[in-house]
Amino acid sequence: MKHYKTICFDLDGTVYKGQEAIPESVAFIHTIQRLGIEPYFITNNSSRSISEQHQKLARLGITTTEQHIMTSAIAGAKYCAQHFKGKTVQMIGETGLREALLAEGHTLVESDGEVVIMGIDHEITYDKLASACLAIRNGAQFLSTNGDLALPNELGLVPGNGAFTELVKASTGVTPTILGKPGSFMLEIIQQRSGASKEEMIMIGDNYDTDILSGIRYGIDTVHLQGGVTSLEEVAAKPEAPTYMFKTLAEWIYTTI
Amino acid sequence: MKHYKTICFDLDGTVYKGQEAIPESVAFIHTIQRLGIEPYFITNNSSRSISEQHQKLARLGITTTEQHIMTSAIAGAKYCAQHFKGKTVQMIGETGLREALLAEGHTLVESDGEVVIMGIDHEITYDKLASACLAIRNGAQFLSTNGDLALPNELGLVPGNGAFTELVKASTGVTPTILGKPGSFMLEIIQQRSGASKEEMIMIGDNYDTDILSGIRYGIDTVHLQGGVTSLEEVAAKPEAPTYMFKTLAEWIYTTI
């Protein structure tokens, strides 16, 4: 395999499953770190703050810096800063999104926002959704951190932010800009941070429709890992194959040569 | 115009707008009642109980009986009784739906229902939606009182039950059975109650996509009233015209001959 300088990992399903580390992935991360490569971690989860995500990785034995963690909340806040600087932002979401927006200097409002951004919110209410719909019908820009329709919890698959986004889209008739995977805005930020060329970047994940597709769309190589969201059969049926397909990362003997 | 024995009125936009009666409609209702016709009232609103709806009509000067009021909550409860007798029912909704389900003798559960039925719920929570999605993924029958994507309130258009239904549909991949208009299940119940033939029935409403379409689908005559949801131009662009189009019901000189 060719040498990659900027190696990007999806988190849930790739580095860990819920609260448990995937040992082959952690071992692979340790190997590349010994060889001088600091990996990037990319998640559609907007609810955790970067420091919470950093602590979770530390608990699973992975040492990294907050600059190497990219969430759809960070992507949302940066996208607002690039495109809607100075506009009021109305959010539906949790700590991660709130902290990311405040860190970029945005002014948060509860209603009549000029930008509406949605992330998962376990404290969702009718009034929050109504207020978002009213702002969007009034001309607010409509952003969403991700299009994940369902998320696993201990009981099964429950609604993700993408399902709430569908509600607002259906009610208003306005289609949002989706910032997380399969969009490639998070990879774009990482490329700027790392200074690598696209040829030197690779995206690793278990979900074809988010992880692999974001890499393909951004024009970088991809690794599909089995045992997660997308089965080998499902990947085989896709129009464009990942660059590599592994059962686990134990199959990738990483060298710097 | 021909003589109709069973005259069905949509409520909001047809008999009243919010808290205000539409005088021509109220006058028409008084006229036909003097001539011995007891009209039926049909609403997609599942949140009010029949007695609350009855009181609202009384406040606006309309005397009727609870048997002449049909809501999507009543339709939902009756549909469950006809098709899923004895199965546990998990509902998202308000007083109207709860009372209707209990009146039909259904056993209500908070999770793992064999039937999930959705109506508008201004006290919606993440957990209610998650629990509905889990039950549906586990094989529960999925019903919804109506597909109304947006409802007017004093601030503008806010999400209706149809938007929440879209959320659950998007997250689970399961399409619900919609019981309210433009479905014709409510008209079917009214026909059974009144004993009229379809030729003797007519449906009056301001919304083409719900009121008029339910009548067309059921195979009865329809009256479109202007000044409500669907404009005259929009009606003209539809593939099938209502039987009659009036500015107000003052244009219909009702006789029993």
Image (cartoon, coloured by chain):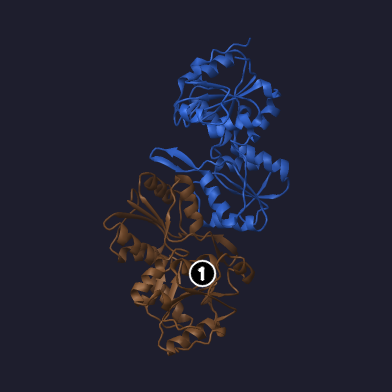
Chain colours: A brown, B blue
Quadrant of res B3: top right
**Could one spot residue B120 in this view of the protein?**
no
The foreground one among B163 and A198 is A198
Chain where mark 1 sits? A
Furthest-top residue in this view = B257
The foreground one among A133 and B173 is B173
Q: How many marks?
A: 1
Secondary element at image label 1: helix
Disc 1 target residue:
A212
> In the image, what residue type sits under mark 1?
Ile
Q: Position of residue B49 (x, y in %)?
A: 56, 36
Assign the C terminus of chain A to one quadrant of the image.
bottom left
Q: Position of residue A210 (x, y in %)?
A: 50, 66
Q: Residue at x 59, y 56 (%)?
A: B172
Furthest-left residue in this view = A86
Q: Viewed as shown, does residue B240 lie left or right of A145?
A: right
Q: Viewed as shown, does residue A153 lie left or right of B220?
A: left
Q: Viewed as shown, does residue B139 lie left or right of B61?
A: right
Q: Residue at x 47, y 19 (%)?
A: B24
Q: Residues within 10 Å of mark 1 (few under 14, many from 20)?
A: many
The foreground one among A212 and B88 is A212
Q: Position of residue A255 (x, y in %)?
A: 48, 89
Q: Residue at x 52, y 81 (%)?
A: A25
In the rendered image, the vertical position of residue B229 relative to residue B47, given as above or below: above
**Could one spot residue B32 in this view of the protein?**
yes
Q: Position of residue B98 (x, y in %)?
A: 60, 43
